[in-house]
Image: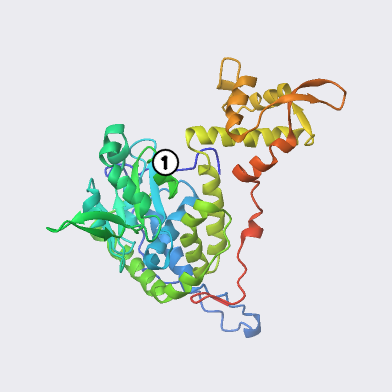
Amino acid sequence: MTDAQPNTPSLPDDTTMLRPPAHIPGQLAISAAPPADADPSDAHPATPVPEGAQILADLRAQIKRYVAMPSEEALTAVTLWVAATHLQRAWQHAPRLAVVAPEKRCGKSRLLDVVTETVRNRLITVNASAAAIFRSITDEDPPTLLVDEADTLFGTAKAAEKNEDLRGLLNAGHQRNRPTLRVSGPEHAVQEFPTFAMAALAGIGDLPGTIMDRSVVIRMRRRADGEKVASFRTGRDTPDLHAIRDRLAAWLTPLRAQAMEMEPAMPVEDRAADTWEPLVTIADLAGGEWPTLARTACRTMTDYEAGQDEEGGLRTRLLVGIRRAFAAVGDPAVLGTKHLLESLNADKEAPWADYGANGLTARGLQVLLKPYGIGSANRRFPDGTQAKGFARNQFLDTWARYCPEPKPLAESAQSVAEPLPGTAA
């Protein structure tokens, strides 16, 4: 992806937009009949599209019709997230969908409109209390929480403090079997309330870091000239969206047991893998191009979000820059501090040139590396000179833990010995 994940906003209703073309949900194009004199042996029938892949393609087309998405990867992610809400009881983790933008009129609410009409068991809330929300969640059929204007809940220190219970609920509800306890009733008995439920939150600016870390993040942006989307009218356009919602339910409901047993190969690890696993599982159930699309979106979007927090992100970026500095001169056993700083400060896309009056200094480098237990020392170089520097093997363990080299996508693709239900052989 580019440095900024492409995003696009919807314009006000008085903006000229394209009218949506006529569409019959799920209807496939019918090819023209071959000429009467055609040789049957020349016919090469196209491979049939798996049912799930076609339903996801239709959902993706509807989202793209009404919303100018930031990227194809983001479009894939939203499509799979919506589908995953129809199998919530199969998942160990309930990924959040964080739809954020730098300012208003970036299409956040429009995307939430489309998501609202296609998810399972929607629960729309604006400024609801945490108590009201957790009393609305059940284990039997978890709702899909939809929160617009989330910046009013967490955008200021005062608001964030007031809504700390809601943030705690959203954090706990990411993982199954994390109930909240409340005293209720005249006997003041302790009662457990389930918290597990998928949630989509839209707002200006980033959400709290603990929520972003549990989210598939969609970074919207304002539409540019020439980017057109169809206008959205609830009464006219929701029937098509509801039809796709019903097709998703009909396709996925019988696959719940299969989905629970699946452990798809993931291109990421740890919490990112927990968050994306339901989406990748849906893609594997669908078949066709979706397994590849899902893993590409997963790796691309998580790579972008990795280290976006101000402090941790700066250090991660430094580790990557140091690895590149070593690689640029053939990965020597030692590298002088002076040479390392020159390499870091020369990177025009990195923040080091503006880190101080003279860019990143030896002192600043030491401070940033201190949490990893890495420091400079007097080193002897191949030409016999001595100077302050770093040994490459000081970084090997830290690189492997905090910024490992990404694996080739082919290594993370799942090989399926037998076709899954709902897919083509």
Question: Of 68 and 17, which appears nearest the observer?
Answer: 68
| Residue 271 in sight in this render | yes
Where is residue 290? Give x, y as percent: 53, 63
Outermost residue toward the left in this view = 186
In what quadrant of the picture does the C terminus appear?
Answer: bottom right
Q: Percent from the top left, x then y, of residue 90? A: 42, 68
Tag 1, which secondary structure?
Answer: helix
| Amino acid type for the residue under numbered disc 1 | Gly
Q: Is residue 180 above or below residue 309?
A: below
Q: Which residue is mark 1?
A: 209
Tell me where residue 246 sits by quadrant.
Answer: bottom left
Count of residue discs: 1
Q: Between 152 and 271, which is closer to the camera in this rendering?
A: 271
Front residue of 224/1: it is 1
189 left or right of 360? left
Residue under the image location 62 percent in, 80 percent down: 43
Q: Is residue 141 left or right of residue 62?
A: left
Q: Residue furthest top?
A: 357
Residue at left offset 29%, top offset 47%: 166
Residue 45: name its quadrant. Answer: bottom right
Q: Is residue 17 visible from the viewing direction of this image? A: no
> Which residue lies at the image location 60% right of the left edge and 84% below the top edge?
37
Work out whether 279 lies above or below 160.
below
Q: Please report the residue visible at 55 percent of the width from the left and 79 percent of the height from the top.
A: 34
Where is the N terminus found, in terms of image quarters? top right
Mark 1 Cα shell of 10 Å, populated few (<14), some (14-19), many (≥20): few
- Quadrant in the rendering for residue 100: top left
Image coordinates for residue 256, horizontal then vertical, percent: 42, 73
Q: Is residue 404 above or below residue 285?
A: above
Looking at this view, is 163 or 253 the one in front? 163
